[in-house]
Image: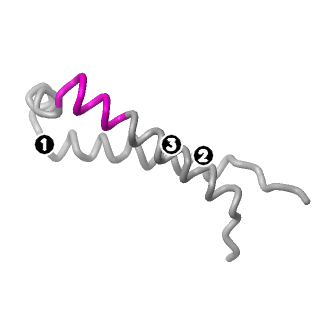
């Protein structure tokens, strides 16, 4: 299976921007410990944050159209 460079590039760019945004949001404004206290589980917060990064990145990879030459 050949990897499409355009799809990978857009997905990687989205991943970096979204990950940076979530890190700033969680560590800077919301506070990670506040989220853990609110939801009651460290594992639940970690899993939710990972899914918030991975799932949109996969969606961008899947829905990006192939470049026609």
User: Which image quarter holds the C terminus?
Assistant: bottom right
Label 2 element class = helix
At x 24%, y 28%, the residue is: 28
Q: Position of residue 46 (x, y in %)?
A: 23, 45
Q: Answer few, some or many: residues within 10 Å of disc 2's Cα (few below 14, many 20 plus, some between 14 and 19).
A: some
**Mark 3 → mark 1, Cα distance in angstroms:** 22 Å
Main secondary structure along the magenta-highlighted residues: helix
Q: Which residue is mark 3?
A: 56
Q: Position of residue 53 (x, y in %)?
A: 41, 44
CB contact under 8 Å: marks 2 and 3: yes
Label 1 element class = helix
Q: Is residue 57 left or right of residue 67?
A: left
N-term-proximal mark, 3 vs 1 = 1
**Region in magenta:** 22-31
Label 3 element class = helix
Q: Which residue is mark 2?
A: 60
7 and 44: which is toward the camera? 7
Q: How is the image coloured?
A: one colour
Q: Is residue 65 magenta?
A: no
N-term-proximal mark, 2 vs 1 = 1
Q: Which residue is mark 1?
A: 42
**Mark 2 → mark 3, Cα distance in angstroms:** 6 Å
């Amino acid at each position: 299976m050949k990897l499409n460079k355009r799809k990978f590039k857009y997905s990687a760019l989205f991943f970096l921007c979204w990950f940076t945004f979530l890190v700033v949001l969680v560590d800077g404004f919301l506070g990670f410990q506040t989220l853990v206290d609110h939801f009651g589980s460290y594992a639940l917060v970690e899993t939710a944050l990972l899914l918030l990064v991975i799932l949109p990145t996969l969606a961008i990879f899947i829905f990006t159209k192939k470049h026609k030459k």
